[in-house]
């Protein structure tokens, strides 16, 4: 698997999520598209979306509801990819969306692997490859980043770190798209800062690639530890997303 192929797969996936063309994501100017259901979109997305912004660094593409399109177009006029996802700009977007009962909420940065940098990192604990059948008793709060109880059918592959018979760290991936599997990782508090998260993430990344799928990793911008883990495991920033939902009072 080559880096160019990985980026092409990611761009195609984002285009399906946004109901746009790949060319829209690479255009020199911002684009506003009407959101619509798409069979190729990530399986957990609730489509159509009210307002969803994505940038791969060159421009911003917004998939929106028809009634909010003028407001989002106004926001994106002269708005650069570098500043459209930060304050004070987001406050402006919130004011434009407020009449529709919407406010910005979900924000995250997404990472893709650099195949020239991904390698299995060491771990002092036993590592085990886990499959879907092994997750049955693991839908617990301590593994809520690695596994999703609401979408159990998408959790397909994992790597566990064991201290004796006790699971102390878990990285798992969900088959969110036909060609892309998302990685999540958890480590028990008493076992953190020992390199377990990076060992699990790096090895699961390699396992996903062996399956012919593109691994991707998501972290909130404020989650510095998670972002560092991604970089340590050979990932690099690829795109950012910002979504709006109902106003929370």
Image (tube, rainbow, N blue to C red):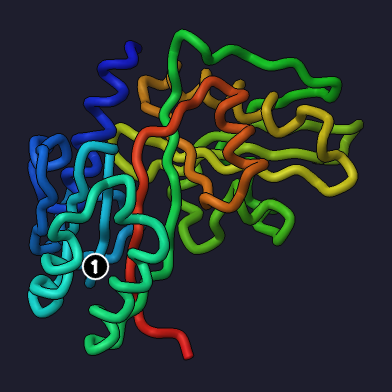
Q: Residue furthest top?
A: 116
Which residue is painted at 22% across and 26% down in the image? 8
The answer to which quarter of the image holds residue 102 is bottom left
Which residue corresponds to the image point at 13% horizontal and 69% vertical from the top-left? 74
179 above or below 242? above
- Image mark count: 1
The percent coordinates of residue 226 (x first, y second) are: 62, 41
Image location (x, y in percent) of residue 126: 81, 23
Q: Is residue 130 visible?
A: no
| Residue at the image position 8 percent from the left and 36 percent from the top | 23
Q: What percent of the width, then of the height, locates residue 36? A: 12, 62
Q: Is residue 180 above or below residue 89?
A: above
Q: Quarter of the image containing the N terminus? A: top left
Using the image as rendered, state which of residue 63 and residue 40 is in the foreground.
63
Q: Position of residue 62 (x, y in %)?
A: 18, 57
The residue pinned by badge 1 equals 51
Identified at 28% across, 38% down, the residue is 56
Visible residue check, residue 110: yes
Q: Nearer the viewer, residue 156 or 56?
A: 56
Image quadrant of residue 89?
bottom left
**Element assignment for label 1:** strand
Q: Is residue 170 left or right of residue 165?
A: left
- Residue nearest the observer in this picture, 182 or 93: 93
Q: Residues within 10 Å of mark 1 (few under 14, many from 20)?
A: many
* Image side of residue 146 versus residue 58, left or right: right
- Image: 117 above or below 77: above
């Amino acid at each position: 698997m080559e880096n160019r192929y990985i980026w092409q797969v990611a761009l195609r996936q984002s285009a399906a999520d946004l109901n746009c063309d790949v060319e829209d994501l690479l255009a020199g100017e911002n684009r506003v598209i009407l959101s619509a259901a798409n069979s190729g979109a990530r399986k957990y997305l609730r489509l159509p979306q009210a307002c969803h912004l994505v940038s791969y660094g060159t421009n911003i593409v917004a998939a929106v509801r028809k009634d909010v399109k003028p407001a989002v177009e106004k926001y994106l006029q002269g708005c650069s990819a570098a500043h459209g996802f930060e304050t004070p700009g987001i406050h402006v977007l919130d004011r434009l969306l407020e009449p529709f009962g919407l406010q910005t909420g979900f924000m995250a940065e997404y990472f893709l692997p650099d195949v020239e940098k991904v390698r299995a990192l060491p771990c002092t604990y036993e590592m085990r490859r886990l499959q879907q059948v092994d997750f049955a008793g693991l839908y617990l709060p301590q593994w809520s980043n690695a596994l999703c109880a609401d979408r159990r059918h998408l959790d397909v592959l994992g790597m566990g770190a064991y201290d004796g018979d006790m699971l102390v760290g878990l990285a798992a991936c969900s088959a969110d798209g036909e060609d892309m599997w998302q990685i999540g990782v958890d480590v028990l508090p008493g076992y953190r800062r020992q390199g377990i998260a990076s060992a699990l993430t790096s090895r699961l990344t390699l396992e996903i690639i062996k399956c012919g799928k593109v691994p991707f990793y998501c972290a909130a911008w404020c989650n510095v530890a998670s972002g560092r883990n991604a970089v340590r495991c050979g990932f690099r920033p690829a795109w950012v997303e910002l979504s709006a939902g109902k106003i929370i009072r």
